[in-house]
Amino acid sequence: MPQKIDAAQAHCYAAAMRRNRKSPQSQKETLVFIIIAALLMIAADQFIFGGTRPYIEQAKREYIEAQNTVIREEEPDAEVSSYDPFFDNLQNRIFEPDPEDRGYLYEEGIYEKDGPQEAAPASGPKSEDETQYIAPLQGPRPKIAVIIDDIGMSAKGSQRALDLPAAVTLAFLPYAPTTPSLAEQAAAAGHELMIHVPMEAMNATVSLGGMGLTSDMDETAFEMRLTEIFTSFDGYSGVNNHMGSKLTQDHGAMARVMARLKEKDLYFIDSKTIGSSVAAFEAAQAGINYNSRDVFLDHEDNPAFIEKALRKTERLALEKGYAIAIGHPKDSTMRALERWTREVQDRGFDLVPASMVLNRPENLQEELMASDLNEIVPAAGTPARPQ
């Protein structure tokens, strides 16, 4: 038989049920409390802990360090190996420049392997001294020429370049609107001036600023463009190429350029934007003073890259008696050079204008040795200039 429930028990049971049943208002208050608590937890995580979990971040760091250790053990150290930070000899890749415009035009972005690889150094830990700049202990002081290209496009960068020591050579874009006035100031400050002549690139979409030399020009148009370039400003002593990865492979075009430079008693420095350039070869054939760039300082626009490039420049100067480095009026490059130019003399190097590190016509027979030609033209040999 069902158990009977008296009136008192029923009353207590009903009261208990009423206590356990929440009103809609109470449920709403609970939900608001939960939401506020969640928001407070998120805010604490973001503003107190920075949106990170310390133990997770520590695990990430340990994993990355372990991976880097493996890479360092498997690959040569970049500071002392044959790896050229501009020409990727290890992978033979083609670099492209940052397409973003930063107030001046970039060098052409097609850069190829240039010259034979050096032997890789022996593996093993390096002493701290091996990573520092090295000055010669005796003998003649090596010479370093630094050329700053693209002067005239960026007012701030160009002015900082003008403020560098007078031994730094400045290469002006002929079409830049401020070039004539800046060139006058630079000459007054004692800088050697060059024309940074725009030449046709492999990438046909790259602008030459309305004053470039291209391979499809007939002889008359080519000569008229050279005249326009030569009259863009005064006081220059030489020329180097702006871009030009296509035109500098053209024997006929380069021969025409060098013939005009010969008439005007100007020197030529090949910026070497492509490894198969014949520009220096044609300059030698024309009997003008010439040379080729050794190091680009700032293909990567960061202080560590520029520091390594400056170290490489000094190392090359020690090896062969001189080195030619080319940079651009970027903020990071100017900061590095403002410091480096104050110190380089004390380390045993002479900072000199570009005209002091040229191959001279009277020494052409010595300079045009087979080893030199193999560096200037493709390894297959020196092609004869078209007649």
Image (tube, rainbow, N blue to C red):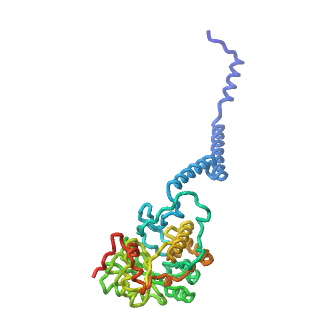
Quadrant of the rendering where the N terminus is positioned:
top right
Classify residue 47 as left or right of residue 94: right
**For the image shown, how many numbered marks are present on the structure?**
0
Q: Residue at x 63, y 41 (%)?
A: 31
Q: Looking at the image, which residue is at 49% across and 66% down? A: 85
Which quarter of the picture shows residue 229? bottom left
Which residue in the rendered view is the most extreme toward the front? 138
User: Between residues 205 and 118, which one lies in front from this camera angle?
Assistant: 118
Q: Position of residue 17 (x, y in %)?
A: 66, 26
Q: How far across and down, in percent of the image, does residue 367 sit?
A: 42, 80
> Along the horizontal axis of the image, is 253 left or right of 303?
left
- Percent across and percent down for residue 182 are 53, 85
The C terminus lies in quadrant: bottom left
Instruction: Residue 91: name its quadrant.
Output: bottom left
**Can residue 174 be seen?**
no
Compared with residue 56, is residue 246 higher up or lower down, i.e. above or below? below
Q: Residue furthest left?
A: 387
Q: Position of residue 84 (x, y in %)?
A: 48, 66
Query: Dividing the picture into quarters, in which one does residue 348 lie?
Result: bottom right
The answer to whether residue 78 is above or below residue 215 is: above
Looking at the image, which residue sits at the far top? 1
Q: Closest to the observer: 150 or 360? A: 360
In this orientation, which residue lies closer to the viewer: 256 or 52? 256
Question: Can residue 151 be seen here?
Answer: yes
